[in-house]
Amino acid sequence: MKKAGELVVVVECVEQALRFYTDKLAFDVVDIDIKQSEYEKAHVVSARLKKGKCFVTFKSPSVEELAEFSFIKRCAGRCISITIEIRTGLGKYFDRCCKRDIKVIRELEHDDEMSSFTIKDPFGLKVTFFQPREVSKQQSVVFLGGVYSRDDLRLSTEQENRLHEQIVDRIKPFGLLRRTARKFVKKKFKQMREALR
């Protein structure tokens, strides 16, 4: 069973987020929660949206969150950014964003691993869209400052275990438990092998 996380973003106006993300960025609506009381007109209190495999819920602050939210919204950049993988057509998607007068804060760039660009939404959040580089063209991958080719990853079990331990020793001082670091390194090597097939 695959596990996935979901970002919840508290915003001043969920309707504004809903319009921007669906009309301008072509997100799909998964769910909407509308509230109405006898003292106020109906309004959207939360909306769950989807782009590819990325799910984001925008919600208005609850009474308990109002003080915290008033401080957070004054922070530059709101300390949050969203990163979304686009499988194909990133160039066309970038052109679409430019045509819709979306504030682009980092133009479409290409490097050895991916292409990406970043926009800013109406609430000051940075949203980065990226597309991984074609696997067939990839000759090497970068991991924690090291560059690995196909040949570098053709190791005996003993050699691989030694290399894993060297990397674990290098990242362990940053606060990871040895068990967590080993799991991370093992998973990363598996991903690197798949990328270099």
Image (tube, rainbow, N blue to C red):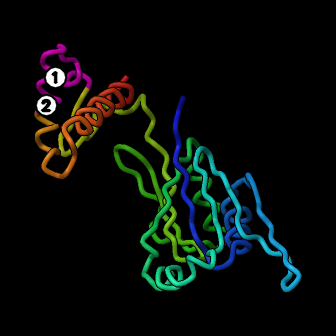
What are the residue bounds of the magenta stretch? 150-165
Measured in 3D between alpha carbons, the distance from the residue under mark 1 to the one under mark 2, in whole angstroms, is: 6 Å
Q: Which residue is mark 1?
A: 161
From what the image shows, is residue 118 above or below residue 181? below
Q: Which mark is residue 165?
A: 2
Q: Which mark is residue 150?
A: none
- Residue at 28% from the left image edge and 29% from the top image edge: 186
Q: Amino acid at mark 2?
A: Glu
Q: Main secondary structure of the magenta part?
A: helix
Q: Where is residue 90? Give x, y as percent.
A: 56, 50
User: Quarter of the image holding residue 103?
Assistant: bottom right
The answer to whether residue 157 is magenta is: yes
Quick one: label 2, few (<14), some, or many (20+) residues within 10 Å?
some
Q: Secondary structure at mark 1?
A: helix
Q: Identify the image quadrant of the N terminus.
A: top right
Q: Where is residue 42? Give x, y as percent.
A: 85, 76
From what the image shows, is residue 130 above or below residue 187? below
Q: Relative to residue 60, is residue 142 drawn left or right?
A: left
Q: Where is residue 68? Give x, y as percent.
A: 49, 80
Q: Amino acid at mark 1?
A: Asn
Which residue reaches farthest right?
38
The answer to whether residue 158 is magenta is: yes
Question: Which of 27/70 is in front?
Answer: 70
- Residue at 21% from the left image edge and 21% from the top image edge: 151
Quick one: label 1, few (<14), some, or many (20+) residues within 10 Å?
some
Question: Which of 167/120 is in front?
Answer: 167
Q: Are marks 1 and 2 in contact (CB under 8 Å)?
A: yes
